[in-house]
Amino acid sequence: MAIIGKPINRVDALLKVTGAAKYAAEFNQPNMVYAFPVRSTIAKGSVTAIDSSAAEKSAGVIKILTPENAPQLKAIDPKVKTGGMLGEQLLPLQDNLVYYFGQYIALVVAETYEQARAAASLVKVNYSKEKHAIDLNTELPNGYKPQKVQGEDAQVNEGKTAPVIDATANKISYTYTTPTENHHPMEPHASIAVWEGGDKLTLYDSTQGVMGARGTLAYHFSLTPENVQIVSPYVGGGFGCKGSQWGHMLLAAMAAKLVQRPVKLAITRQMMQTNVGRRPATQQKMAMATDDQGMLTAIRHHTDSYGNKSDFFEPSGKQTAVLYKAPLREITYKIAKLNIGTPTYMRAPGETPGTFALESAIDEMAYKMKMDPVAFRVLNHTAEDPSKKHPFSSENLLDCYTIGSEKIGWQQRKAEPGQLRKGKQLIGYGVATATYPAGRSAASAKVQLMADGSVIVQSASQDIGTGTYTIIAQTASETLGIPVEKITVKIGDSSFPPAPVSGGSMTTASVNPAVMAAAEMVRKELLALATADAGSSLKGRRPEDIGYADGNFFVTADKTTADSYADIMRRNNKNIVEACTTAMPASGSGLGAPTAPCMEAPIDKEENSDKEKYSFHSFGAQFAEVWVDEDFGTIRVKRFVSVQDVGRIMNEKTARSQIIGGVIYGIGAALMEETAYDHRWANPTTRTLADYHVPVNLDVPDIDVHFIGKPDPHISPIGARGIGEIGTTGVSAAIANAVFNATGKRLRDLPFTPDKMLLKS
Amino acid sequence: MRPFKFSTTADSNEVSKILIANPHARLLGGGTNLLDLMKEDVERPTELVEVGNIDVMKIVSPASATGSIVIPAVEKNARTANDPAIRENFPMLSQAILSGASAQIRNMATNGGNLNQRTRCTYFYDVAMPCNKREPGSGCGAMKGLNRMHAIFGWSDKCVAVHPSDMCVALAALDAVVKVQGANGKQRSIPFTAYHRLPGDQPQKDNTLQPGELITAIEIPKNNFAENSYYLKVRDRASYAFALISVAAAMELKNNKIVRVSIAMGGVAHKPWRASVAEKYLLHKEATEANFKIAAANEMKLAKPLEHNLYKVELGRKALVRALMQAANGGKTI
């Protein structure tokens, strides 16, 4: 019964649309109080005095936490692996130093949210202000050259492409810039902290990683991890800003500890701009050269960006190490420190700005060589990882170009810009390549078959809106031969068997092999009971002769010879048959060895993500048709085609939604998203969603998603790669390339707002 | 938000009394702007008077005597935009309202509130920033800050903010009249173009309402613009964004000759900006693209752009021409 792949509705859809799905801020507790942060209004310096006298007299106020009275947290020790990952190396209210505008410097706790918020506005703060660093170009000379980026060398072939590129006229060299962006999931972060005595903590939290949150909270409050429970059953979007742990989580627990009551801390949209990470701005210097036939001879990609209180920087050279056959590639970074809230992972970190630069430059190179941009990409396509020299585990990119060209109607495109119009609208077509690594991490899952035929699957994974609940149910259903309706998936709780953070597009590839392996163990154990059971019609049959469906085993050659799971369990006095497995990829486990009672899932190395042998990446082709108003410079994406080579599709509906959402994210990055800073205060001026624009319905055209659908034979026995991020990659370049095709104007600075089009000659 | 007293009344005289007795009292219509401002700690009323039920009347059809239409202040934006009489007589007003905000906000927001909404200048909204409009004497954050969205006409060294409304741009072009009521039921009529202010030395004052006065209605006089009018809005995304530039253009044509013309612009000034220079040029001329271009250029010559909004001069010129072309074309896309 092929249930994996079917476009079934989300199993949590009814709960969500009826409001019954409970999000972090909705787990109200008896005797609960509310916290509201006070934030710095300088970007660098120190707090010299906090006058909270007026706030303390304000109605309902219980406590005002400052560095003077805040509970002391165990200090950050870079040598210690906590199991979590702080978003910034900065613990709240442990000292009086300020590193960015909007930093938490005090916390008001009151009986109601409104009282806490009102009192927070009465707290007066004096500062000793220092000159902040805010301009990237000013600070770059003091920047550093990082040595590693996600485990790989961060400075590759520095200086080595110049002789090749300088020696030819067949070259291009341009700088592309991308702005700071914020994640802005629909649901802002929220935490409710509940202490039982001094050594047991429960945190209801909106997080992409319950295990990481547990590790961080346990470490900094000096608790044993088993005494910390993180509960996060539903997450209203994350996009990376809920992947690591941020100050509000610690603050909620600190406040609850101090006032000895449960505390809710729900942050505001304004704080989403300052306190929970961002994608940092990049300046990417691209250069490349070809021979006279258009074969790339060298690619150079240098990224300038910034960081603050962490080692994270935007790894926008990643895709340049993977795409195209160029024999020589130079990929380097330089990072300055700015007094802006700390950058972090944001949907396709690296590839989103990186593919904008690379795929715009590829388009410019194709124009330079008077070649069709699709043909140019096909000519330079590589079937192996050009940096690691490994074969790709599965790669069908050429099919993506072919199918996408057909669907968008690429033949309508005129090579010369500005040739197609309708009234005042100039029409153009653009293409870009999409790619994202196909990661897999160790993950555990427990499967329990109950006597009534129902199934419970548990894993400390998360569903951040992607459909994880649903595809886990589908995997268990197919493996057990039990309808989806009878399967209850429990995730988003750190007390379940450990699973990785829902980030890096690896949840599907990581968790489902564990679910499948555990379900297989349950099924095999049940079948063993039947074949050994004198009361079973399957007594003595060989397992390979037995099929299963709808809660029954049957003889494949004679389906009338059958036995039901319920009967087998009843006859054997079993209330439950269960198994817990950990699926460990061949290279790199992430979580370490399985913990009892979980057993390692038996997976052949050849289908277990062996990175020594294969390079694991997804690929795609993005095609845009844009209409540009010739007077106003307003750009509308009229049609979009996204062809994706992402391995096996677990659920055609939720997968499509992921790609559609990714493309919309890319349209936002291309046309409107930007967190702007006033350099005098280093404050974001795009404080709300009225200023920080994301696409609205009218900005989003028909998006035609096509999946190649060929399972990846080497990533896992299931063959599915993650798809949360690849949909965004290449989108802004496809739009930029289409705008050039429409107008002859080459925009290299995101986002493409009308003013930039108007001022561009 | 800070604690406040809340009351509700259907009696407009009672409202005036409260406003006179308490200068820190504010009227609550749809709350789509005021409540945001209270959460941001920008508005700090000690008293809120909910006025949604005051003097509710239906939008009246053109009266036989004068042909004007009166819109109640407490009527919702959405119902106003969709009223058949408005659609028939003043389609440009419907277009303007429907190009503003979102369907949800228009369902809540009142007409009076639309007139009295505050600027969306980010420095006004962020209490950590200086703003003469919010805190007179504290300085203007936008003047030398990020002023891409700000004024190119009529600004002062105290304030460069723009009025955010679309509806008001159309009402300015339609020569509407704001009906207000003050203490003891005293009635007053204010020409729409005199209702909102330029910032001058008192940017904290958005309009010319006197203490104790509230808007009861907006009257739109009869005109013959319905055939040749258009509201054009250029913005950063396709919907749900404030105008970079908007133009309300209306003409009365006789054999393609302009016998009456009215043009207002949004997104360019502290109040809806009547393009009187362009109007003057166009009156009694042929409705041709060439004439529209000269009129637009003449108007935009007066613009004084700031560091980040130079583009608005070019955009304004092109938007004026496009709006006039579409108005001349019966409101249809050219």
Image: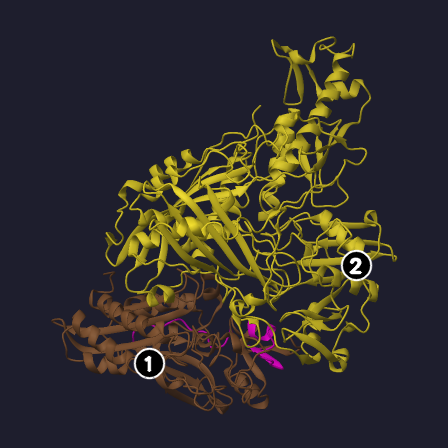
Whether residue B47 appears in magenta in the rendering, the answer is yes
What is the letter of the yellow chain?
A
Residue B227 seen = no
Does A367 appear in magenta?
Answer: no
| Label 2, label 1: how far apart the Cα atoms are | 60 Å
Q: Which residues are magenta?
A: B36-63
**Chain ID, mark 1:** B
> Residue A103's quadrant in the figure?
bottom right
Q: Is label 2 in a helix, a strand or a loop?
A: loop
Considering only vertical position in the picture, is A429 above or below A257? Answer: above
Q: Which residue is mark 1?
A: B303
Quarter holding the C terminus of chain A is bottom left
Q: Which chain is brown?
A: B
Residue drawn at 72 percent across, 36 percent down = A444
Callout 1, which amino acid? Ala
Residue A178 picture location, percent across and down? 48, 59
* Rendering coords of residue B208 (x, y %): 43, 88
Q: Name the residue type under label 2.
A: Pro
Residue for badge 2: A30
**Which chain letter matches label 2?**
A
The residue lying at 78 percent from left, 21 percent from top is: A570
Which type of secondary structure does the marked residue at label 1 adopt?
loop
- Work out whether residue A435 or residue B317 is closer to the camera in this orientation and state it: A435
Query: x, y percentage for residue A624?
Result: 37, 48
Magenta stretch: helix, strand or loop mostly: loop
